Image (tube, rainbow, N blue to C red):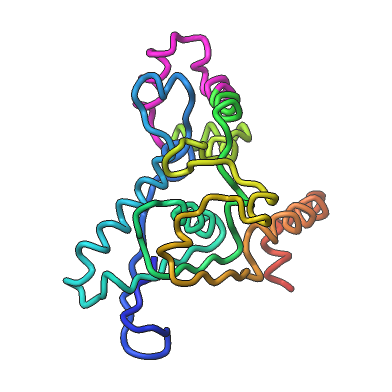
Amino acid sequence: LFHSSTSTFTKGAQVLTACSYRVGAPGFLHSTEMKEAGYLPNNGFRDQRTALLWLQKHIGGFGGDPDNITLMGESAGAVSTAVHLHSEQPLFKRAMLMSGSTLLKGPSPMAITDGNYQMALKVLGLDSLAPQERIQKLVSMDGQQLRATLFENGVAPLVSIPLVDGDLCPVAIDFKSVMDGSLSLPGRQWCESVLLGDCAFDVSKTSSRVAREYEADKPSGQHPRTAIRQE
């Protein structure tokens, strides 16, 4: 998150604010049975929205201007920034999206989320329990254990996908609705400007290269990061 006290980044002072939020399973794992048990989806985005509302209310106490906030995000942060443009309530004045948008990692329908949820339950050893019991086990599980198990079994990326919830993520997003202008985007009315760009070494661009280097260096035991640093 970035707050600028002037209309440019080259004049005056700026107040830089970083926002911590729930990621992975704590932030985005959801399902029909979790909804029926009263749990809300997309908690990572809810954390961010809470931070933005806090800024509007309190940034003046730090010398900032609540009416002149710029939201910046890179990679997954850019996806989040794009999501907040769906808010009916104004949250910021400008937005900067670097190497990401909701076309990169947009919200999925509940049918997809339910499938990912079932895969997570299986690798966590909770799939044989009754719904209420496994939800309780899930929400009380040690966070490090949860993260490690999901990563080791390749499920972590799947449970990080946001859900079309009719609220923070009101609709599914595709290229057609973006290009023909049919995508409902309330932020068009209250966000003054949006800057789009990319980062040369963003993980979405380098992951395939790292994987190739890793496979090539496997016999020698060399870590791919070593090869990249040597370049």
Reply yes or no: does residue 120 show up in magenta. Answer: yes
The answer to which of 221 and 53 lies nearer the viewer is: 53
Q: Main secondary structure of the magenta part?
A: helix
x and y percentages locating residue 134 in the rendered image: 42, 16
Q: Is 100 drawn above or below residue 23 in the view shown?
A: below
Quadrant of the drawing holding the C terminus: bottom right
x and y percentages locating residue 75 in the rendered image: 56, 59
Residue at (42%, 85%) from the top-left corner? 8
Residue at (51%, 36%) from the top-left corner? 163
Q: Report which quarter residue 117 is drawn in.
A: top right
Left or right for 160, reference 174: left
The answer to which of 219 and 198 lies nearer the viewer is: 198
x and y percentages locating residue 127 in the rendered image: 52, 14
Q: Is 22 drawn above or below residue 216 in the view shown?
A: above
Q: Is 25 drawn above or below residue 4 in the view shown?
A: above
The answer to which of 78 and 195 lies nearer the viewer is: 195
The answer to which of 124 and 104 lies nearer the viewer is: 104
Residue at (37%, 32%) from the top-left corner? 40
Residue that sits furthest to the left in the current view? 61
Left or right for 146, reference 220: left
Left or right for 3, reference 222: left
Residue at (48%, 43%) from the top-left corner? 169
Reply yes or no: does residue 91 show up in magenta. Answer: no
Quadrant of the drawing holding the N terminus: bottom left
x and y percentages locating residue 201 in the rendered image: 64, 67
Q: Which residues are magenta?
A: 118-143
Q: Is 85 drawn above or below residue 106 in the view shown?
A: below
